[in-house]
Amino acid sequence: MNTYQNLKVNIENGICTITINRPDKMNALNRETVQEIGAAVKEANENKSVSSMIITGEGAKAFAAGADIKEFMGLTKEQGMAMAKAGQDVFQSIEDCPKPVIAAVNGFALGGGCELAMACHLRIASENAKFGQPEVNLGLIPGYGGTQRLIRYVGRSKGLELMMTAEMINAHKALELGLVNYVVPQEELHAKCVGILNEIKTKSPFAVGAAIRAANAYDGVSPNPIYGAKGIGFETELAEFGKCFVSEEIKEGISAFLEKRKPNFN
Ligand code: COA
C-alpha cells in the first residue's frame, strides 16, 4: 500500500477507509491532498481485496473545510482553471468508481469538502455536520463540480440559493433537502457506513458497478410520451442492462433465487 502525506488509509474486512489527516487545518484540501485522494481511490479500486470505500476527515470537527484558501492567492485565470480541472478530474474519478464510495461526513463539509462529499455515491452525516458552498464570500464559485452536483441533489432553486447566499446548513436540513442519506450520532457514523457497505457487499459487484454507471449517465431527460425513452441516460441503462447478461454473476443470482438460497457472488 502507498504511503500518503495527508491521508490515513486503512483496510478492514474489505472496506478501505480513507481519512483526510490535516485536522489542525480543518482537513482543508490543498492540491497535494486532492491528488492523494485520487491516488488512494485508484489504489483501492485496483485492490481485489477491497470491495468498497469510506472517505472521512480526521477528528471530530471537520470532514473538510474546503480547498486550501492559502493556495488561491495570486493565481492567474489559467492557473485557476488548471486547479479546478485537477480537482474536477479527481472528484469525477470517485463518482465513476465502480466500487461504492460513502462519504462519512463527521463535521464541516464546506466548499471543496462539500464537493468531495457530493462526488461520493452516498453521504452519511454525523449530527454535528455542516454543509455549505461559501465560495462567494471569497469572490469565487465552487470549482470541483459543485455547481453541477449540488443542483442534481437539491434542485436548481435551492442549489442556487445555497451557492449565492453561502448559507451553512446543518445535517438535518441537509437530510431534508436530499443532500445526505442519513444523519446519525457521531459515535455511530463509521458503524452506519460499514453496515450499509456490508449490505451492498452481499449483492452482485458487477450489477452494483452497472447501477453506478447508469446513474452517472443521468442527463435530466424524462421519457417522452410520443418517442419513448431517449437520451444518453436511458441508452447507458440499456447497455449496462445488456452487459449484466454477459457477467457470470447473473447466473449465480438467478440460480440462487430458483434454488431458494442466498446468492454467493464472491
Ligand atoms: N483553507 C485553509 N485553511 C483553513 C481552511 C481552508 N479552507 N479552513 C480552515 N482553515 C484553517 C484556519 O486558517 C486555521 O488555521 P490557523 O490555526 O493556522 O489559523 C485552522 O484551519 C482552524 O480554523 P478556524 O477558522 O480557526 O476554526 P473555527 O472553528 O473558528 O472555524 C470554519 C471553522 C470551518 C467555520 C472556518 O475555518 C472557515 O470558515 N473555513 C473556511 C471555509 C471556506 O470558506 N471554505 C471554502 C474554501 S473555497
Image: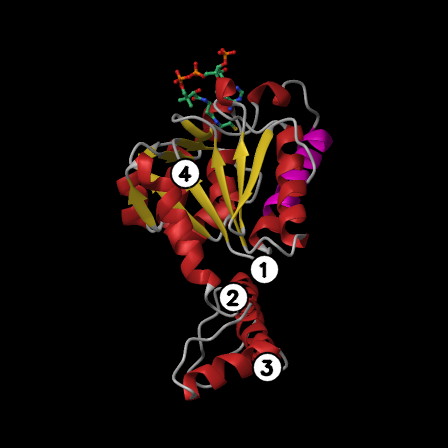
Q: Amino acid at mark 2?
A: Val
Write the residue at 61% across / 38% down: 37
Residue that numbered label 1 is attached to: 98
- Is 195 left, or right, of 141 in this rendering? left
Of 214 and 168, nearer the camera is 214
The residues bearing labels 1 and 4 have C-alpha atoms spaced at a distance of 21 Å
Residue that numbered label 3 is attached to: 242
The residues bearing labels 3 and 4 have C-alpha atoms spaced at a distance of 35 Å
**Does residue 125 show up?**
yes
Q: Earlier in the sequence, mark 3 or mark 4?
A: 4
Cβ of mark 1 under 8 Å from ligand 1: the answer is no
The residues bearing labels 2 and 1 have C-alpha atoms spaced at a distance of 7 Å
Q: Amino acid at mark 1?
A: Pro
Write the residue at 42% across / 49% down: 194
Residue 17 image point, x, y percent: 52, 42
The residues bearing labels 3 and 1 have C-alpha atoms spaced at a distance of 17 Å
Q: Earlier in the sequence, mark 2 or mark 1?
A: 1
2 and 1 marks in contact (CB < 8 Å): yes
Does dot 4 land on a helix, a strand or a loop?
strand
Q: Earlier in the sequence, mark 1 or mark 4?
A: 1
Residue that numbered label 2 is attached to: 208
Dominant SS of magenta comes to: helix
Residue that numbered label 4 is attached to: 105
Q: Residues within 10 Å of mark 4 (few under 14, many from 20)?
A: many
Provide the residue span drawn in magenta: 77-91
Q: Residues within 10 Å of mark 3 (few under 14, many from 20)?
A: few
2 and 4 marks in contact (CB < 8 Å): no
